[in-house]
Amino acid sequence: MEDRGLERLSLEFKGAFSDAGELEGYASVTGIVDRDGEIVAKGAFADVSAFVQAGFFAVGHDWTGLPIGTVEDAREDDNGLWVRLAFHSTPEAQAARTVAMERLARGKSVGLSIGFRSLEDRWETVEGKSRRIIAKAEVYEVSLVPIPANPLANATSVKSMSLADEAEEVVILARRLAERARAVARLRREQGKSLSAERVEQIREAARLLTETADEASPRPAPDPETIRRIADRLARLKRRIK
């Protein structure tokens, strides 16, 4: 194998993705030819205990900045290297989580890729071509990538957020909606036009839903006895009228 230099630490990147919240998926799929023309053999990830303890979650294999998450669980099964990753609460990590969630919500793929060192490999002829077979690997990190080397390495789910996380997400989306609606409205006015009645109603409906939810969720003090008596009297009068 060629010497890739100490600065590369002999690392090679493959592909898969899960939330601060958590994300789950396959970081590498075994037994297939990847985009680099290599094959990760079954058993290559037999021991990932060190990876779970010290590994990290990044974006685009960037080792110069802070990680966006931790490795909570990892194991090799019949499909490949399955991982469960937890995002940090930093703005950068949450921005990555937002992108991942939005892509999955829109039915798009979310690619993962691993940074690893080959501990044991060999060359074999597969379908008439010489292929490098990775028999044993030491994994250092998992990255969120747009195009993984392994085309089948993708996230399978992003688990639901806590109510606090989801509320924060909605606030961000509502702010973006408001800014975009104002910008579009200004542009339409300059053109002598306006937002369609349908779009205006959609914005109002969103506002109504949030306001109603806030009203229902707001804590209310227990009614005093006098208030309870007045309500009872009103109900009694209402029943008499109905009869």
Image (cartoon, rainbow, N blue to C red):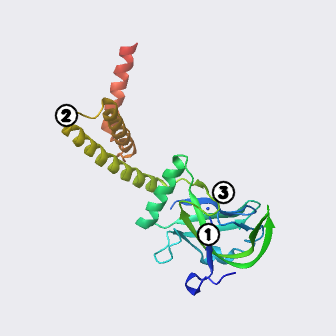
Q: Which of marks 2 and 1 is nearer the N terminus?
A: 1
Q: How far apart are marks 2 and 3 (CA)?
A: 50 Å
Dividing the image into 4 quarters, which one contains the C terminus?
top left
Work out whether 224 lies above or below 71: above
Mark 3 residue crowding within 10 angstroms, few (<14) / some (14–19) / many (20+): many
Amino acid on which disc 1 is placed: Ile
Q: Name the residue under label 3.
A: 152
Q: Quadrant of residue 23?
A: bottom right
Q: In this view, does 191 lie to the left or right of 113?
A: left
Q: Which of marks 3 and 1 is nearer the N terminus?
A: 1
Camera-near label (2 vs 1) is: 2
Q: Nearer the viewer, residue 239 or 213?
A: 213
Q: What x and y, as percent, mark residue 80?
A: 72, 63
Q: Name the residue under label 2.
A: 192
- Callout 1: SS: strand
Q: What x and y, as percent, mark residue 19?
A: 54, 60
Which residue shows up at 32% across the image and 41% down it? 224
Amino acid on which disc 3 is placed: Leu
